[in-house]
Amino acid sequence: MDNDSVRLLRECNAGIKMGVSSIDEILENVSDSKMKQILKESRQEHCKLEKEMEEYLEECKEPEKEPAVMAKAMSWIKTNMKMAMKDSDKTVADLITDGCNMGIKAVYCYLNQYPAAENKIKNLAEKLAHIEEKLVKDMRVYL
């Protein structure tokens, strides 16, 4: 597998880890059962895609990439500050929407940064963006 493919995979894999971590962190604060179900289903989709990406990385004997420590810390701080100010499903939807939008932007930046990546890897990256876009759409009714 070429360098662009490996780099794109590693970046997307780190982004998925960040997304799953964010969902896990916020799930306990959700009171609406439908919203909780939406988040759980999205988490499952993220985990399924993460596993697929990890299999490709294993084939290449490439290590997974963990999310940046600073990004995780900032996300944790933002989440906990907002939830402390107003613990509501609207706040959860706002945080999830912001996180997904950042993830979507990152995926397309990486797709542009690594244009020589194999099509199957680009398709995985685009699948990640679509999962995030769907979650944003699903959160709109809670904003």
Image (cartoon, helix red, strand yellow):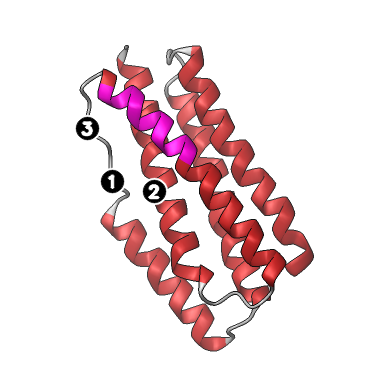
What number is the disc on residue 136? none
Element type at mark 2: helix
Q: Amino acid at mark 3?
A: Pro
Q: Mark 2 packing: few (<14 Cα in 10 Å), some, or many (20+)?
A: some
Give the quarter of the image for residue 25.
bottom left
* Marks 1/3: CA–CA distance: 9 Å
Q: Disc 3 designates what residue?
A: 63
Residue 66 shown in magenta? no
Element type at mark 1: loop
Q: Is residue 113 above or below residue 36?
A: above
Give the quarter of the image for residue 94.
bottom right
Please report the residue visible at 55 percent of the width from the left and 22 percent of the height from the top: 123
**Residue 5 x/y as whole percent:** 38, 19
Q: Disc 2 designates what residue?
A: 17
Q: Is residue 32 above or below residue 106?
A: below
**Residue 135 x/y as whole percent:** 65, 51
Q: Mark 1 packing: few (<14 Cα in 10 Å), some, or many (20+)?
A: some
**Residue 54 x/y as whole percent:** 34, 32
Q: Is the Cβ of the residue at disc 2 closer than 8 Å to that at disc 1?
A: yes
**Residue 97 x/y as whole percent:** 62, 58
Residue 49 shown in magenta? yes
Give whichever of discs 2 and 3 has the lower sequence position: 2
Please report the residue visible at 52 percent of the width from the left and 79 percent of the height from the top: 82
